[in-house]
Image (tube, rainbow, N blue to C red):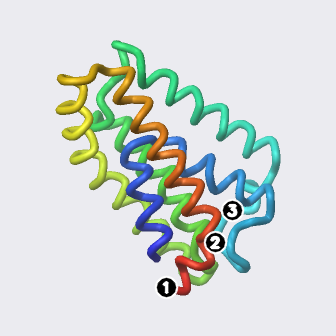
């Protein structure tokens, strides 16, 4: 469940990144054996689409018109994508628990992440803080997806 929890932390900051990370890992056949990922997730077109959406979200985050991550639709998106990611990182028999852990963690992590970003933006601005957050989110998601099998054994 550690991988699902960690990916939920990522999902609290960027809604589409967890889905993109696990879709790419699934397409490359790099998820743990007997994982709970939906079969469709491993299709290369799904992985490419999820990646495109994640890139779009990151670009949009730098815009002045970007909504706060804690609006209802943003929280719902974070829950759904992180739940799918959480299920994908655990054994099939635990997929519902992994989904709950990933989704609920994402919603909970959204609030402190939002507060931290707002505090940083007042000093450094929206775009620089967004790029720093993107780097942390991307690095974290890639490391979690790549090491999910090891994290599951921990």
Residue visible at 54% across and 80% down in the picture: 152
**Residue, far top:** 64
Q: Can you tell which mark lies on residue 38?
A: 3
Mark 2 nearby-residue class (10 Å; few <14, some 14–19, many ≥20): many
Residue 132, compared with residue 12, is above or below; it is above
Q: Look at the numbered discs 1 and 3 and tell me whether their residues touch, using CB distance below 8 Å.
A: no
Q: Look at the numbered discs 3 and 2 and tell me whether their residues touch, using CB distance below 8 Å.
A: no
Q: Quadrant of residue 118?
A: top left
Report, in whole angstroms, how far the alpha carbon at label 1 lies from the one at label 2: 18 Å
Tally of numbered discs: 3
Badge nearest the viewer, 1 or 3: 1
Q: Secondary structure at mark 2?
A: loop
Ranked by sequence position, the earlier of labels 1 and 2 is 2
The residue carrying mark 2 is: 36
Mark 3 nearby-residue class (10 Å; few <14, some 14–19, many ≥20): some
Residue 120, compared with residue 39, is above or below; it is above
The residue carrying mark 1 is: 154
Report, in whole angstroms, how far the alpha carbon at label 1 lies from the one at label 3: 24 Å
Residue visible at 28% across and 20% down in the picture: 125
Ranked by sequence position, the earlier of labels 1 and 3 is 3
Q: Is residue 114 left or right of residue 45?
A: left
User: Measured from the top left, where is residue 46 in percent x and y?
Assistant: 74, 44
């Amino acid at each position: 469940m550690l991988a699902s929890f960690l990916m939920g932390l990522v999902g609290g900051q960027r809604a589409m990144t967890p889905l993109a990370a696990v879709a790419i890992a699934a397409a490359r056949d790099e998820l743990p054996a007997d994982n709970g990922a939906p079969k469709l997730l491993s299709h290369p077109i799904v992985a490419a689409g999820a990646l495109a959406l994640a890139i779009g979200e990151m670009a949009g985050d730098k815009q002045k018109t970007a909504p706060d991550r804690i609006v209802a639709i943003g929280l719902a998106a974070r829950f759904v994508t992180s739940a799918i990611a959480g299920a994908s990182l655990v054994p099939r028999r635990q997929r519902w628990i992994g989904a709950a852990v990933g989704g609920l963690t994402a919603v909970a992590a959204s609030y402190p992440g939002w507060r931290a970003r707002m505090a940083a933006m007042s000093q450094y601005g929206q775009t620089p803080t967004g790029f720093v957050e993107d780097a942390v989110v991307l690095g974290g998601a890639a490391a979690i997806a790549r090491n999910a099998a090891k994290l599951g054994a921990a």
